[in-house]
Structure formats: C-alpha cells, structure tokens
C-alpha cells in the first residue's frame, strides 16, 4: 500500500503540474472548462484511490471510474485520467472473486458514459468510443495476462519445492535406513559375543562409529535447507565412495565382496549419487533380510553407463530380519528412471535376492 500510495500521490501531483495539467483524455470532446473545485475532486478521485488497487481493486476501479466520468462530462482535462488505465490493469491483475461481474460492470459503465457524453452534445463518433473502449479493454487484458503468468510461476515454484522435498525425503530414507539397520544388526549380534569381550568391544565400537557417521551425514544433508549455506559438490557420495560403504557394511557383520570391472567414465554427480544409493539400499536390504549371508556387489563400467548387480545368498541369517516400509526400492526405481535408467529387484536364479540397475551415461558436468 505504501508503494501504491506513492504512485497515486505522484499522479495527483502531475495532474496539476504544468504543462501536464491541461493534457488529459478528451473522450467526448466537450467544451473545455477551466479547473475548479470539482475538477480538483475529480482528479483526486482518479489518483488517490490507487492506494487500494491491489487490496480492493474493484472498489478502486469504481471510484476512479467515477472521477473519470465527472471529468469527461464536465469537460475538464487533467493528467489524472491515466489513473483509470492503472485501475483497469490492477483489476485485471489482482481481482480474485467475481472477475466476470466486475468486467461486465465496467463494460456497462463505459457504455453508459458514452451515451451520457452523446446526450451532452459530444461530437465524437461511435468509432471513437469503440477504439477508446478497446484501449481500456487492453489494459484489463494486460492485467489478466500478468495474473496468469504469476499463477504459472507460483505453480512452477510449488512444483520445484515439492520436488526438492521429495529429494530430501529420499536422501533421509537412504541415510537413516542404512545406518540404523547396520546398528540394529550389530546390536542383535552383541549378545552372542558376550563370551568374547574383545569382539564385543569391537561390535560396540562399530555401533558407536555407525551412529556418529549417521549423525554426520544427516547434519550435512539437513544443511542444504539452510539458505545461507551452499553444499559443496564434493559432499555428495559418488561411485568412488563404494569401497568405504562396502567396508563399513562388512564391519557391521555382513560378508560383502565388491567386484568392479571397466574404467569409470564419469557419469555426472546426479547419476553417481543415484548409483551409490542403489548399492546402499541393496546392502541395507541384505542386512535386513539376509544378515550374515554372503553378498556380492558387481559394478561394471561400460560406454553406455554403469551396470550394477547386488546379489545376496539365500537362507537364514544370524539375526532376525529388520522390518522395512517397502518404499526404499520404489524410491530408487523412480530416482533411476529420472536419468533414463532401469532398476529391477527379485529372487536370484540360484536362490537369494538380486537388485540390478542400469544408469546411462550423461553429461559429466
């Protein structure tokens, strides 16, 4: 309202500032009258109500149009007539409810003004009123277009925010489920190590390290929500971090073997993160449902991208299965499909469970 108030005050000042004071709309071409008290009131009615052009655009348009009608019917000419153009644009851009009714009312009011000017002796032709009416309609349509453009921009912003929330939710799921599953598996195995204090101490140390690592990754992940912090690209896991992931999983008590073939060609940070999360989720599921059973991670670098195969042997594990929500693999499939890849999961031919994914190569940048 402060900005709009300043706009209205500026137009009011220009309405009485030579040489603009006598330059205004002469729609009806009625005999010119010198400015008097009524001319001042008409000019103020066309400018000062613009302070409400965003909050109450219909009321603003009604008052401004009234001042404009008085000015035209009395034969005044002031620069304040620009206010009716601004009010029409504002009604098109900011009127939320009853837009059609406001538009229809404006058309009827303009037609009434044309009839009144003709009755007052106006020499303007019908075509003159039509052309001026089209100019007024163009102001309304310009405001309506701006309203639509802003609505589309807001929708894009909401979609981007929803996408970012979904991305963060996926990252949180992957980080939490992997580390917490490892801690649960290690804790479940601890009672069996009570007779061996040294191994029990190693298990408890591994649980503590896993918890600290989980807290660190969560802190880094949630840090992206801070608008003053720009997360470095190097903070994101890549295929080069798979060795550490396998080592940590092995330390948690899950026999894991990493087999890597081919030469890494650089997939791009987004694709490498997706590949890392595929392996991480597959190892998490192995610890949940095949704890203590051998697991093989095969990573093959090809010209068309990277192929991942994680297979866990079947049979009972050393610890009870940890329940899951079932959303991990579904979320991974969506993540991989974003890059045009494929992901499948199901029983392995020789028993056990296999997660296979193909992530095509992309722009390394």
Image: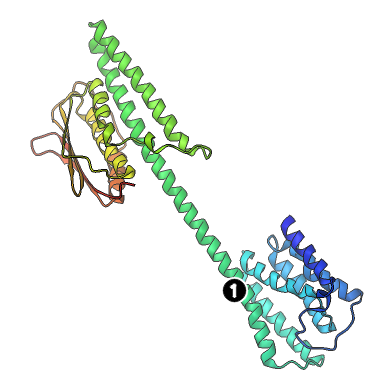
Indicate the secondary structure of the residue bearing disc 1. Answer: helix
Please report the residue visible at 66 percent of the width from the left and 78 percent of the height from the top.
Answer: 136
- The image's colour scheme reads rainbow
**Label 1 belongs to which residue?**
141
Q: Quadrant of the N terminus?
A: bottom right
Please give left or right for residue 348 compared with residue 174 in the image: left
Res. 29 in view: yes
Furthest toward the left, the residue is: 350
Image: 180 above or below 18: above
Q: Is residue 264 left or right of residue 16?
A: left
Q: Is residue 101 above or below residue 294?
A: below
What residue is shown at x 31% (from left), y 43% (from top)? 331
Percent x, y of residue 172: 38, 35
Above or below, comparing residue 200 to residue 183 in the picture: above
x, y (%) of residue 263? Answer: 19, 39
Q: Please say whether residue 1 is visible from this viewpoint.
A: no
The mark tally for this picture is 1
Residue 209 spot, x, y in % from top left: 34, 19
Q: Residue at left 69%, top 60%? A: 55
Indicate the quadrant where residue 271 lies. top left
Q: Quadrant of residue 59?
A: bottom right
Q: Quadrant of residue 191?
A: top left
Q: Is residue 190 left or right of residue 164?
A: left
């Amino acid at each position: 309202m402060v900005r709009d108030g300043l706009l209205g005050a500026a137009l009011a000042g220009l309405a009485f500032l030579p040489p603009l004071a006598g330059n205004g709309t002469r729609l009806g071409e009625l005999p010119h009258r010198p400015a008097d008290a009524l001319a001042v009131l008409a000019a103020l009615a066309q400018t000062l109500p613009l302070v409400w052009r965003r909050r109450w655009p219909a009321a603003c348009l009604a008052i401004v149009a009234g001042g404009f009608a008085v000015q035209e019917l009395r034969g005044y000419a002031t620069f304040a007539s620009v206010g009716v153009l601004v009010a029409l644009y504002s009604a098109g851009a900011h009127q939320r409810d009853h837009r059609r009714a406001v538009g229809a009312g404006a058309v009827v009011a303009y037609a009434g003004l044309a009839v009144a000017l003709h009755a007052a002796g106006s020499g303007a032709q019908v075509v003159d009123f039509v052309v001026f009416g089209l100019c007024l309609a163009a102001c309304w349509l310009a405001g309506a277009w701006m309203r639509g453009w802003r609505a589309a921009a807001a929708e894009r912003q909401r979609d981007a925010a929803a996408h970012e929330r979904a991305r963060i939710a996926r990252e949180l799921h992957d980080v939490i489920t992997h580390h917490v599953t490892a801690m649960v598996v290690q804790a479940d195995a601890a009672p069996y190590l009570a007779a061996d204090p040294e191994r029990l101490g190693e298990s408890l140390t591994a649980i503590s390290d896993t918890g600290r690592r989980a807290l660190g990754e969560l802190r880094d992940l949630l840090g992206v929500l801070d608008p003053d912090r720009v997360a470095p690209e190097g903070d994101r896991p890549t295929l080069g971090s798979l060795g550490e992931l396998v080592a940590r999983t092995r330390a948690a008590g899950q026999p894991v073997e990493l087999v890597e073939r081919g030469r890494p060609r650089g997939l791009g940070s987004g694709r490498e993160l997706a590949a890392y999360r595929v392996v991480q989720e597959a190892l998490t599921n192995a610890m949940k449902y095949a704890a203590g059973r051998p697991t093989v991670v095969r990573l093959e670098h090809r010209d068309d991208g990277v192929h991942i195969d994680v297979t866990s042997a079947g049979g009972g594990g050393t610890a009870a299965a940890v329940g899951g929500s079932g959303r991990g693999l579904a979320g991974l499939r969506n993540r991989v499909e974003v890059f045009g890849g494929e992901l499948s999961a199901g029983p392995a031919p020789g028993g056990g469970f296999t997660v296979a994914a193909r992530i095509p190569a992309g722009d390394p940048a």
